Image (cartoon, helix red, strand yellow):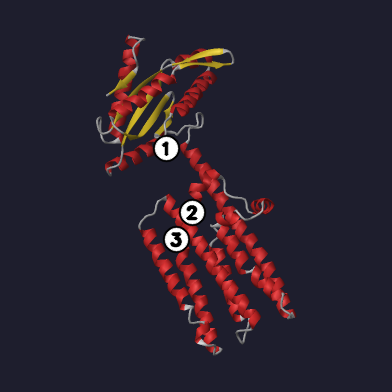
C-alpha cells in the first residue's frame, strides 16, 4: 500500500483512513508479530487456492477444446506458487528478525495482489470475448477464490482491502457493462457482496486491533509500577533473566545498580505520604531523564529502585553509568512551596567481574549499597557511589 499511496489524492487518503484507520503506532511491533504468525499459517492455503484456480481454468479450457496455446502458459503460475511456498517456508524456518518479517509480509501482500489482479483480469477478458462455452465458470471461480484469499488476509489491512477491490469490483463492473440483463443483476449482487465483505474484513481487523490494545494495557498493568510508571519488580526481574540468558549464550555483558533513598522515612513522617509519593515520582522522572539507550530503570518497592544495564563494554562502563545516575539524581524538589531534599545511595555490580548470574549481581550490588549507606552515616560528606 505504501507505493500506491503516493499516487492517491489527499482527500481520497483521508477518506480511506477514516473508513480503515491504521493501528496506533504503539501497537506496530505487536501487530507485525500477529500478522506474521497469521500469514505464516495461511501461506500454504493461499497458494493452494491460486493453484486450484489455475487447474480449473486449464480443465475448462481443455473441456472446451481450446488450443493449447491459450492455457499452456498457466503451469508457470503453479510452479511459481510452489517456489514461493518453498521460499517462504525456508525463510520462516530460519527464524527471521523483525525487519525480515516485515519484508516477508510486504512481499506476500504484493505477490497476492498481483496474482489476484491477474486472475480477475483473465476472468473479465474471457467473459467479454466469450472464450468459454459457459462464460461464468472461470470468472466466478476466480472471484470466489479471490474472496477466500482476501478473507484469509484480514490481518494485512492493505492486502485485504486491495485484494477485495481487485477481485470483486472490476468483475462486477464488467458484468454490468454487458448487454445481458441477468449479468447486470449479477454484477449488482457482486458489488453488494464486495461491500459487505469489505465491512466484515474491516470489523475483523478492528477487533484484532482492539484485542492487541487490551493485551498491551493488561501487560502494562502487570509490568508497570502504578505510582511511578517505571517497570515493576516482575518486569525488571524478567528483564534480568533475559539479560542473563543472553549473556550465557555469548551475548553482551550486563549489570545492575540498586538505589535506596536516604531519609525517605522522615519525609513520610514529617510531611505525610503524599509528600513521600511526590518524592518517589520525582525520582522516577529523573531516572527516566537520565537513562541511556541501554538502561532499564525500575522500582522494586518502597523507596528502592533498580537499573538494569544492558550492553556493558566492561566494569568501567558500569561504574560510569552508576556515577551518572548518582551524581544527577539528588537535589531538591518543590511541593506546593515545600522544599524536599532527594538523597540516594547506590550500589552496583557488573558481569562478569562480580558474577555471571542475575542473582549473584543483585547480591553483590545489595552489599555494595549498604556499604555505601554505612559510609554515608559515618561521614555524610562521603561519596555514596559504591562498587563490589
Q: Which residue is mark 1?
A: 235
Between 298 and 252, the one lying in front of the other is 252
Element class at badge 3: helix
Q: Residue furthest bottom?
A: 65
Q: Indicate the position of residue 84 as horizontal and vertical percent values.
A: 43, 67
Q: Label 1, label 2: how many angstroms apart (C-alpha)?
A: 22 Å
Q: Indicate the position of residue 231 as horizontal and vertical percent values.
A: 45, 34
> Counting residues from the N terminus, which is met first, the one under dot 1 or under dot 3?
3
Badges 1 and 2: C-beta atoms under 8 Å apart?
no
Element class at badge 2: helix
Between 69 and 289, the one lying in front of the other is 69
The answer to whether residue 32 shows anywhere in this view is yes
Q: Indicate the position of residue 55 as horizontal and vertical percent values.
A: 49, 79
Q: Label 2, label 3: how many angstroms apart (C-alpha)?
A: 10 Å
Residue drawn at 48 percent across, 42 percent down: 219
Q: Which mark is residue 34?
A: 2
Quarter residue 370 falls in: top left
Q: Which residue is mark 3?
A: 40
Q: Label 1, label 3: how many angstroms apart (C-alpha)?
A: 30 Å
Viewer-side label of 1, 3? 3
Report how many numbered discs are placed on residues in the image.
3
Q: Quadrant of the N terminus?
A: bottom right
Whether residue 366 is situated above or below residue 331 in the rendered picture: below
Q: Quadrant of the C terminus?
A: top left
Describe residue 220's horizontal placement relative to residue 89 as left or right. Answer: right
Amino acid at each position: 500500500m505504501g507505493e500506491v499511496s503516493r499516487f492517491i489524492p489527499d482527500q481520497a487518503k483521508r477518506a480511506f483512513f477514516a473508513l480503515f484507520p491504521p493501528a496506533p503506532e504503539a501497537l506496530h511491533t505487536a501487530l507485525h508479530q500477529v500478522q506474521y504468525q497469521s500469514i505464516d499459517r495461511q501461506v500454504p492455503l493461499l497458494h493452494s487456492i491460486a493453484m486450484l484456480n489455475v487447474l480449473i481454468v486449464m480443465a475448462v479450457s481443455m473441456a472446451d477444446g481450446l488450443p493449447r496455446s491459450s492455457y499452456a502458459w498457466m503451469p508457470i503460475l503453479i510452479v511459481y506458487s510452489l517456489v514461493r511456498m518453498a521460499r517462504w517456508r525456508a525463510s520462516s524456518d530460519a527464524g527471521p528478525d523483525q525487519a525480515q518479517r516485515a519484508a516477508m509480509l510486504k512481499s506476500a501482500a504484493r505477490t497476492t495482489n498481483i496474482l489476484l489482479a491477474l486472475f480477475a483480469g483473465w476472468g473479465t477478458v474471457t467473459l467479454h470475448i466469450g472464450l468459454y462455452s459457459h462464460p461464468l465458470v472461470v470468472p466466478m471461480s476466480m472471484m470466489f477464490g479471490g474472496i477466500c484469499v482476501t478473507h484469509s488476509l484480514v490481518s494485512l489491512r492493505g492486502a485485504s482491502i486491495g485484494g477485495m477491490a481487485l477481485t470483486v469490483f472490476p468483475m462486477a463492473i464488467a458484468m454490468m457493462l454487458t448487454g445481458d440483463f441477468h449479468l447486470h443483476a449479477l454484477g449488482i449482487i457482486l458489488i453488494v457482496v464486495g461491500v459487505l465483505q469489505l465491512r466484515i474484513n474491516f470489523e475483523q481487523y478492528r477487533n484484532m486491533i482492539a484485542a492487541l490494545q487490551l493485551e498491551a494495557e493488561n501487560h502494562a498493568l502487570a509490568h508497570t509500577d502504578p505510582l511511578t510508571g517505571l517497570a515493576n519488580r516482575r518486569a525488571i526481574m524478567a528483564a534480568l533473566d533475559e539479560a542473563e540468558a543472553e549473556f550465557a549464550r555469548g551475548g553482551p555483558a550486563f549489570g545492575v545498580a540498586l538505589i535506596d533513598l536516604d531519609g525517605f522515612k522522615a519525609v513520610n513522617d514529617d510531611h505525610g505520604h503524599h509528600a513521600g509519593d511526590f518524592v518517589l515520582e520525582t525520582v522516577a522522572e529523573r531516572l527516566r531523564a537520565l537513562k541511556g539507550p541501554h538502561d532499564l530503570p525500575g522500582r522494586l518497592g518502597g523507596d528502592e529502585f533498580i537499573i538494569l544495564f544492558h550492553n556493558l563494554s566492561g566494569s568501567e562502563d558500569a561504574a560510569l553509568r552508576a556515577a551518572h545516575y548518582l551524581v544527577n539524581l539528588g537535589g531538591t524538589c518543590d511541593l506546593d512551596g515545600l522544599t524536599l531534599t532527594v538523597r540516594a545511595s547506590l550500589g552496583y555490580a557488573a558481569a562478569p567481574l562480580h558474577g555471571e548470574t542475575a542473582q549473584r549481581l543483585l547480591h553483590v550490588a545489595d552489599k555494595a549499597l549498604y556499604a555505601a549507606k554505612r559510609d554515608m552515616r559515618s561521614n555524610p560528606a562521603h561519596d555514596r557511589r559504591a562498587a563490589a
